[in-house]
Image (cartoon, helix red, strand yellow):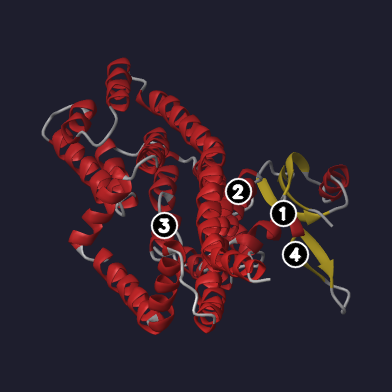
Amino acid sequence: MPTYVYLAQNEQGKEVGGEIEAPSEMEAIAQVQRQGLLVLNVREIRGLGTRRLADGTSETTATPQAKSFSFFAGGGVPAADMVFLAEQLSTLLKGGLPLLQGLKLLGQNVSSPRLTKALDRVAQDIAGGTNLSQALARHPRIFKDIWVPMIEAGEASGQLPKALEDISNYLNQREALRAKVVTAFMYPSILLATSIFVLAFFIIKIVPVFSDIFKNFNLKLPPLTALVISVSGIITGNLGLIVGGTAGAFFLWRLYLKSDAGQWTSARLMLSLPMFGPFVKNILVEQFLVNFALLLKSGVDILKALLIMEKLLGRNRIISKAIATARESIKGGGTIAQGFAQSKAFPPITVQMMRIGEESGRLPEILDTLSSYYRRQIDNFIARLSSVIDPIMIVGVGMIVTVIVMAVFLPIFELSSVGTGGR
């Protein structure tokens, strides 16, 4: 049964709020009115429902729609739970439900035990007099990115429900982009993995069998066949060394990436890859623009917003360094555009539009327009990716398989021709 939150006035004119279960909104209003209250607002808590227990009582549960998104999430706290929390807490607060009660209610209805425990502690902290932003800041691995600064700004402006709604929209947008990127790379990745498996099977299992056959017949092998058999022999004879060496190299590379020099190397490599470099840069710039605009619109100071963005995009040292350079320039009295122009890490169009936004006093709106432009660029790249990569991979793998098959069957054709000539 759906759950509704309501805001009403009692006989003394005092506003009261609460939650109620009802089959429809009209029935929820009727139930509130039967309590002698004047209904001001009733809103359904979407994603929550109830189930009947054996003792006749009921408990609130997350509906399948609320949980389905979480099914595809990775480890830690599923992104869907974070979206659900921001969205529904905003709805509850708009409906007049007290913050503490809303947190307890939602804590019982997220799929992640880790988030449930965190919300329990947050509720305890708030009951002890801590404000929401400070309570969330004690769980940085869960409430990361823009959660704390946005909530802090919402508390300062008295617009906490709006801040939560903005967080929800941001998380939804980010997940949509992530899903597009994953979907775009999924088919090429599966195709590549399948191709490697097939080629490995040919080289390790099939070619050695034919190699023994050719030796038994003392055939003079064509150069192509001799080359393929030689490569197969090297791989099968050193398979353990190759697998161990590859695993070791991968481990050392991961270790190197954790160092300062490794992070710089990774950043330069990601941004300089043919075809993919501009795509990665567009994603980073779009992420910066969306978050920076959101923080500014929420009332966060420019320098603080840039510091947050520096940490948020810290995994790419080139972009985070550019943001740090801009922040130092602004500290020294320069404009935002001047600061970003110094690093040359951001595209010229971004810097020019920032200058226009500063001069017109409409910087957040300009940043939103820019982020839409980069989102279209990302979407266009993803749309073109399959049409470009798939044929290249299919043709490339097909050519390699053809070479191996020809190398195996050329001696067989020669053998059959010798047998035919001998009759």
Instruction: Look at mark 2 in the image and give the residue it sits on.
Output: 87
**Residue 308 placement (x, y as % from top left):** 31, 47
Q: Is residue 116 left or right of residue 155?
A: right
> What amino acid is labelled 3 in the image?
Lys
Does dot 1 land on a helix, a strand or a loop?
Answer: loop
**Residue 30 placement (x, y as % from top left):** 87, 45
Q: How far apart are marks 1 and 4 (CA)?
A: 10 Å
Does dot 2 land on a helix, a strand or a loop?
Answer: helix
Give 373 or 44, whichever is nearer the viewer: 373
**Number of other residues with Cα within 10 Å of mark 1, as a class: few under 14, some 14 to 19, many 20 or more:** some
Tell me the quadrant of the picture where the C terminus can be found: bottom right
Q: Distance between the residues labelled 4 and 2?
A: 17 Å
Of badges 4 and 2, nearer the viewer stands 2
Residue that protrudes farthest toward the left in the picture: 332
Q: Which residue is drawn at 42% across and 46% down?
A: 150
Asked if one can make out residue 120 in the rendered structure from this viewpoint, the answer is no
Q: Residue at x 28, y 36 (%)?
A: 302
Would you say the residues marked 2 and 1 are in contact, meaning their CB atoms lie under 8 Å apart?
Answer: yes
Instruction: Look at mark 4 in the image and give the residue it sits on.
Output: 60
Q: Point out the tag, 1 or 3, that comes first from the N-terminus.
A: 1
> What amino acid is labelled 2 in the image?
Glu
Instruction: Look at mark 3 in the image and give the residue it sits on.
Output: 144
> What amino acid is labelled 4 in the image?
Thr
